[in-house]
Amino acid sequence: MKPSTVAAAIETSAAKLDQAGVIFGHGTDSAWDEATALVLAVTGLPDRKSSLTASVSATQQARISQLLSQRIEQRIPLPYLLGRAHFAGLEFEIEAGVVIPRSPIAELIDAGFQPWLTRTPDRIIDLCCGSGCIGIAAALEFPDSTLTLVDIDPKALTLAGRNVARFDLQERTELVCSDLFSALAPAQFDLILCNPPYVDAADMRSLPAEYLHEPALGLAGGEDGLDLVHALLKSLPQRLADTGLLVCEVGASAPALMRAYPEQPFIWPDLEQGGEGIFLLAPGLA
């Protein structure tokens, strides 16, 4: 018998995902969470207990089955199938060819970067911005700030522009196609955010199929995973304000970073919501 309620649809979908051995990590971390996201997206229902008893129509069930088949047979990450992803409590448009939002930097944004950010930022920049999710979430946290979104990929910048419009931030946002700061005029920023490609060469060779759907340009960080981070740190004295803060994600390349810069006063915040490899640099706290 086909599922007739949201609860039954979630249970059936989770069982199929679990049996197929798909890999999670693009906004969900279990078969149950992913099945819940899929079913609620198709039915348009909110994520609360009362939704579980709602009916699932035959048309909705057919759509759920179609998405499950694509997810399992082609290993396409769910956000690409749905065309959207959630980050820092916000929903962003997403599309194939741009890295899917999932950075643990979201936790720091929700906390206003406290206690490390010593003053409210006037100028925020999001380097390697992809969909723009990190910079946009930060700009919404600090409503008097200006935002610069930077990416080397025009496709990513186009998507970021649509997300800027989605949150009505056009008047205080600039989008720049650039390799880090190279195409920007001289200026300093109060808050520099960066989630660069940081997967090292060894890990790139063993990525699960789900991650191969994402652009290598947004993942591969060179032999040690730190090609762009080396360049970022070199430019930091000219780009970070004296009272500013750099927030950068390097994930599993964190040990390589510490070996490369043993004298740098990196701050590694504890992440209560999970994740790893976020470092901060704050000249005013050094």
Image (cartoon, helix red, strand yellow):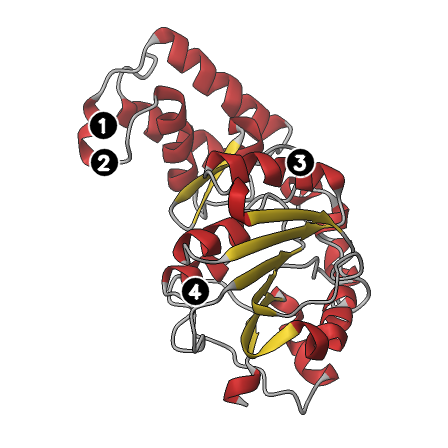
Q: Is residue 113 visible?
A: yes
Give the spatial CA distance, label 3 vs label 2: 34 Å
Which circle marks residue 158 in the picture?
A: 3
Q: Is residue 21 visible?
A: no
- Residue 167 x %, y %: 45, 39
What residue sits right under mark 4 in the picture?
A: 108
User: Residue, x 43% and y 45% (percent of image)?
Assistant: 30
What residue sits right under mark 2 in the picture?
A: 48
Looking at marks 4 and 1 on the same chain, the residue that comes earlier in the sequence is marked by: 1
Do callouts 4 and 1 mark residues in contact (Cβ within 8 Å)?
no
- Which quadrant would residue 281 be assigned to in this image? bottom right
Do callouts 1 and 2 mark residues in contact (Cβ within 8 Å)?
yes
Disc 4 element: helix
- Residue 7 x %, y %: 27, 27
Q: Is residue 155 left or right of residue 277?
A: right
Give the spatial CA distance, label 1 vs label 3: 35 Å
Label 1 Cα neighbours within 10 Å, binned few <14 / some 14-19 / many ≥20: some
- Residue 227 x %, y %: 79, 66
- Which quadrant would residue 241 be assigned to in this image? bottom right
Q: Amino acid at mark 2?
A: Arg
Label 2 Cα neighbours within 10 Å, binned few <14 / some 14-19 / many ≥20: few
Give the spatial CA distance, label 4 vs label 1: 31 Å
Give the spatial CA distance, label 4 vs label 2: 25 Å
Q: Nearer the viewer, mark 3 or mark 2?
A: 3
Q: Which residue is more in the foreground, 17 or 112?
A: 112
Q: Is residue 90 left or right of residue 260?
A: left
Q: Is residue 50 left or right of residue 136?
A: left
What residue sits right under mark 1 in the picture?
A: 51
Q: Amino acid at mark 1?
A: Ser
Image height check: is 26 above or below 61?
A: below
- Residue 153 x %, y %: 75, 44
